[in-house]
Image (cartoon, rainbow, N blue to C red):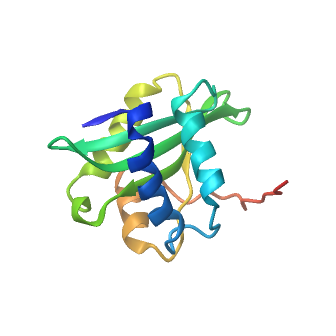
Amino acid sequence: MIRKMLQTDKEQVFRMMRVFYDSPAVKTKSSDEVLRRDIDAAVGDCPFLDGFVIEEGGEVIGYGMVSRGYSTEYGGECVLVEDLYLKPHARRKGHSSEFFRAIEENYPQAVRFRLEVEEENLSAVAAYEKMGYHASDYLNMSKER
């Protein structure tokens, strides 16, 4: 089951985020302060970020963070899957597909869905391709403040 993240989920999600951000799946090793700020935004009033938890049998087995913006290229709302993490025992059981179906249902107005993945993470790349995602033709650039 996929549901919106609640205040009561904050510590469980923080522990999963810490594992995720300390893994090779993420290049930036964010601080505890940044991760806690992300969770507060996801469960608070931030209009740009939504948090979700993935449950199985009453246990929180994963989380996802989704940010929203506008794509002038596609003329509408763009949804970016910022984070998707599943505990190791919950992987390869269809939960990722369930998460992406839920995201598409939660944002029916979106004209584009995006995500980032490490090229070396071949199993994730293959899974996302099965769900209709493809490599972008653009070079992703950023500037941090």
Residue drawn at x 66%, y 59% is 137
Where residue 33 sits in the image (x, y, percent)? Answer: 65, 53
Q: Judge from the rendering whether residue 95 lies leftward or rightward of residue 41; answer left or right.
A: left
Q: Please determine whether, in this image, residue 35 is positioned above or below residue 103.
A: below
Q: Judge from the rendering whether residue 110 lies leftward or rightward of residue 86; answer left or right.
A: right
Residue 67 visible to an observer of this rendering: no
Q: Nearer the viewer, residue 25 or 33?
A: 33
Residue drawn at x 51%, y 31% is 43
Q: Quadrant of the N terminus?
A: top left
Q: Please determine whether, in this image, residue 100 is positioned above or below residue 86.
A: above
Q: Quadrant of residue 141?
A: bottom right
Residue furthest toward the left? 57
Residue drawn at x 32%, y 51% is 96
Q: Quadrant of residue 7?
A: top left
Residue drawn at x 47%, y 52% is 14
Residue 139 visible to an observer of this rendering: yes
Where residue 20 sits in the image (x, y, percent)? Answer: 47, 63
Q: Nearer the viewer, residue 124 or 27?
A: 27
Tally of numbered tags = 0
Q: Please determine whether, in this image, residue 26 is positioned above or below residue 36.
A: below
Q: Please determine whether, in this image, residue 107 is positioned above or below residue 113.
A: above
Where residue 113 sits in the image (x, y, percent)? Answer: 53, 41
Q: Quadrant of the C terminus?
A: bottom right
Q: Nearer the viewer, residue 132 or 88?
A: 88
Where residue 50 sits in the image (x, y, percent)? Answer: 52, 33
